[in-house]
Image (spheres, rainbow, N blue to C red):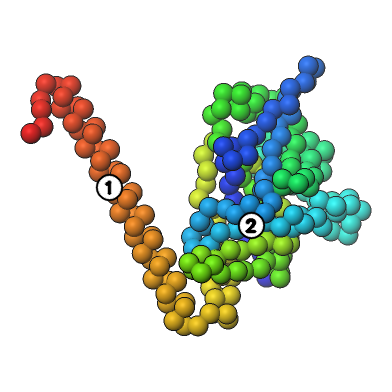
Amino acid sequence: MALEVERRYVAAAELPIELEERSAAAPIIKGISPPFNSPSVDLGGFREVFAPDAFDHLIGRHRNDPRGGLDVLALFNHDENQVLGRSTSGTLEMNRTDKGLAYSITPPDTQMGRDVVTLLRRGDLTGASFAFSVAAGGERWDQAPDGMATRTVTKVENLYDISVVSRPAYPSSSAALRSLEAWRAEHLTEAEQNHIAERVADEAADKRRRWSYAITSTAARLISARLKAHGTRIK
């Protein structure tokens, strides 16, 4: 059974993407994605934490391994037509640090590579995203008293790409949600499961109401501004 690819986003405001300037060559793009032991935002009823050793068996995989060396792409916006680096060529390097999985990208001397560096300098790119799959048995679930679950990823089966992105994509977490439901079915009573489902539904409805209110308020302000610009007042 093929493992499902999941994506997560790390905002530059949380962990900045750095440019290491070099006098005779293009700068190196550096960052951390993901951080270790750092709870994520709400991913739809659960938060997620990556254990410090979750990537160890991948990062340490030798090129003579029967599975081959680790082949991870560095991309712009997860687009495989816009390659910034690759682990097999040495233009993408990764290592474990105290903060998280650190990456170092040597961008190509192409128009796309130069553009990405320029966009990073200007602050137009919002962060980094990574695509991965969790190994069988490579996760642990815990339930907080308020019903919020935490998934601790202890072993990643594969890391597919690390991408510098202009806009965060909605995290693809359907595999994690299925795993969460299976864990709850095994460890929680039916009443506890119903209570959590009701709480999640209420929170989702509240988010929709706040979003609708924000859109309505913005639209009202725009209409008012346009009418005032034409000399009309709203009574």
The amino acid type of the residue labelled 2 equals: Val
Q: Secondary structure at mark 2?
A: strand
Task: Measuring from the top left, give residue 26's x and y in whole percent.
Answer: 74, 23
Quarter of the image for the N terminus: give it.
bottom right
**Mark seen at residue 64:** none
Task: Measuring from the top left, give residue 144's x and y in whole percent.
Answer: 54, 67
| Residue appearing at x 59%, y 37% in the figure | 12
Q: Is residue 166 above or below residue 39?
A: above
Calculate the distance from the C-alpha at mark 1 to the C-alpha at mark 2: 32 Å
Q: Is residue 62 above or below residue 110?
A: below
Q: Is residue 190 above or below residue 35?
A: below
| Residue appearing at x 81%, y 51% in the figure | 59
**Mark seen at residue 213:** 1
Q: Is residue 155 left or right of residue 15?
A: right
Q: Which residue is mark 2?
A: 49
Q: Are marks 1 and 2 in contact (CB under 8 Å)?
A: no
Residue extending farthest to the left is 235
Q: Nearer the viewer, residue 83 or 216?
A: 216
Task: Measuring from the top left, give residue 3's x and y in whole percent.
Answer: 66, 64
Q: Upstream in the sequence, badge 1 or badge 2?
A: 2
Residue 126, visible in the rendered structure: yes
**Dot 1, how many residues are within 10 Å of its Cα: few (below 14), some (14-19), or many (20+)?**
few
Residue extending farthest to the front is 145
Residue extending farthest to the top is 23
Q: Secondary structure at mark 1?
A: helix
Task: Measuring from the top left, give residue 97's x and y in whole percent.
Answer: 77, 45
